[in-house]
Image (cartoon, rainbow, N blue to C red):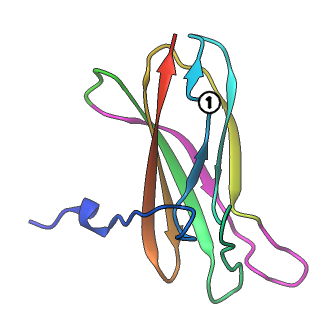
Amino acid sequence: MKSFGQFLQTGDWKGEKHVPVIHAPEKVKAGEGFELKISIGDAIGHPNTLEHYIAWFKVFFHAEGAKFPVEIANFNFAAHGEGDNFTDPTGCTQVKLNKSGTFHAISYCNIHGLWENSQEITVE
């Protein structure tokens, strides 16, 4: 049986322009809101043309001890170099956590497929 996970690629976002970058603090206080930002191309820019673009990000949070992660954000980028309409593949949301865990971000490039990254966060 084939697994969807076999299609997920990873790398260091400083050297690979497709890896989603997770901008979140390392530690937060339980129940206090903070900004979670996901971006692409922080170190190496990614094209945004009709032929080559980032279509979306999905962000999940897997709390320590939980059986499954939960989807906390979904960012879709519809304009790809069409006239004067351009999107910068960046998404922001406010998050409140009560448990420590791990953020998992997945990006989709229409040519180079799926890319993943993760970052742990501690809740005090």
* Total residue callouts: 1
Point 66% across, 75% down: residue: 46
Determine whether the residue tagged by mark 1 lies in a helix, strand or loop.
Answer: loop
Residue beneath disc 1: 25
111 part of magenta stretch:
no
Point 45% across, 52% down: residue: 117
Residue 117 lies, with reference to residue 99, above or below; the image says below
Residue 93 lies, with reference to residue 108, above or below; the image says above
Residue type marked 1 = Pro
**Crowding at mark 1 (Cα within 10 Å: few <14, some 14-19, many 20+):** few
Question: Which residue is the extreme one toward the left?
Answer: 1
Q: Position of residue 39 (x, y in %)?
A: 65, 55
Residue 122 lies, with reference to residue 55, above or below; the image says above
Prevailing SS of the magenta stretch: loop
Q: Tell me if 81 is positioned left or right of 108 in this view.
A: right
- Which region is colored magenta? 68-87
Quadrant of the drawing holding the N terminus: bottom left
Q: Position of residue 87 (x, y in %)?
A: 77, 67
Question: Which residue is the extreme one toward the right?
Answer: 84
81 part of magenta stretch:
yes
Foreground residue, 90 or 42?
42
Foreground residue, 23 or 2?
23
Q: Position of residue 70 (x, y in %)?
A: 42, 34
Residue 79 lies, with reference to residue 106, above or below; the image says below
Point 48% across, 61% down: residue: 12
